[in-house]
Image (cartoon, rainbow, N blue to C red):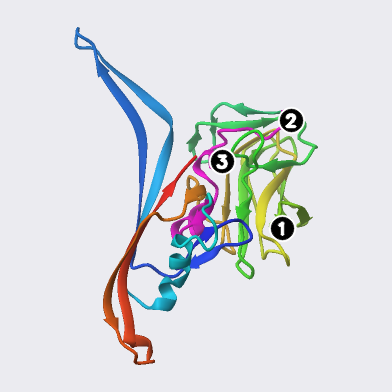
Amino acid sequence: MTSYIGPIGGLVAIDCPSTLVSTVAREQVERVTTSGVVHVQVSPRTRRQWRLDWGVATPAELAGLGALVAGEFGLGPFWFVDPWAQVTNLLPPAASTLEVAAPGDRSVGGPAVLPGGTRVGRTMLIGDPAAPTVLPWVSTTEPARVPVVAGVPVTGSLWGLGAGAVQVRLAWYDAAGAHLSSTPWASVQSSGRMVRAHQSTLPVAGAASVMVTVMGASRVARPAITWTDTLMDWHVGQGAHSVVVPADLAQDVILATREPRLHGRLASASTTIREVG
């Protein structure tokens, strides 16, 4: 499956690497006192990187990545969407776990228990459930608009608690961040219990990103957006809204001839994409 990197509205396709390995690291500083007590300072944030390898690739398959490294699309930071994120949850990790509440009369809330006994560690409280709330956010001033691709279906979902029906819809934005339109509301009856509301549809013409809007819920948890036409099991967000272009691109030429046939030019390649911010 294809990965994508670039600004919202200008994603560049990275064709089918042979392997794509992601790693997550959290900075820790350890100090041992003279009495033997161990103190550890733990960073509140994790940082990720992705290693992409192509065992055998054609010039066409490496062209987009090579142009990125050469600076044709600028230096970023960019969005990075790998195949795993597309089918699990495209939100950044902090946005998917509601680390930041939406502006206004919303606040970060405590834990909740979903049907079946699953416990979530963080929720968002909404002061006026009758007012539409657009989410999620990566900071109090920066919404987590998720990039979309024309013709690829999108499913948005969240868990919500309300006195009546919990309603969701998808809000579409252009490349400049201007709101284009929203889908009709999709409803699920809550009546005092946590329910999962969702909607699936294709992006509208001109849409470059999407967010989820909720109404009727006083508490929400675990939002998700996937590039799928059906609801998927929730997973912590895998999207990366701030990565730098690869600083390295190693190419090992396998075959380079003037023969015009496809197999006349082949190389193996590898690179690393790093999260920043």
Q: Mark 1 points at which residue?
A: 174
Residue 95's disc is: 3
- Mark 2 neighbour density, 10 Å: few (under 14) some (14–19) many (20 or more): few
Residue 271 at least partly seen: yes
Residue 63, x across and y down, in percent = 45, 72
Rendered position, 267 above or below 246: below
Q: Name the residue under label 2.
A: 104
Asked if labels 1 and 3 touch by Cβ distance under 8 angstroms, the answer is no
Residue lying at 46% horizontally and 43% vertically, measured from the top left: 276
Callout 1 secondary element = loop
Mark count: 3
Under mark 1, the amino acid is Asp
What is the spatial separation of the Cα atoms under label 3 and label 1, in whole angstroms? Answer: 21 Å
- Closest to the camera, between mark 2 and mark 1, is 1
Residue stretch rendered in magenta on the structure:
78-105
Residue 269 relative to residue 236: left or right: left
What is the spatial separation of the Cα atoms under label 2 and label 1, in whole angstroms? Answer: 24 Å
Which image quarter holds the N terminus? Answer: bottom left
Which label's residue is closer to the chain start, 2 or 1? 2
- Magenta span has 223? no
Residue sitting nearer the eye, 60 or 185: 60
Residue 98 relative to residue 27: left or right: right
Callout 2 secondary element = loop
Q: In which quarter of the image is residue 195?
A: top right
Under mark 2, the amino acid is Gly
Rendered position, 164 above or below 20: above
What is the spatial separation of the Cα atoms under label 2 and label 3, in whole angstroms? Answer: 17 Å
- Magenta span has 94? yes
Asked if labels 1 and 2 touch by Cβ distance under 8 angstroms, the answer is no
Which label's residue is closer to the chain start, 3 or 1? 3
Residue 274, x across and y down, in percent = 41, 49
Residue 52 at least partly seen: no
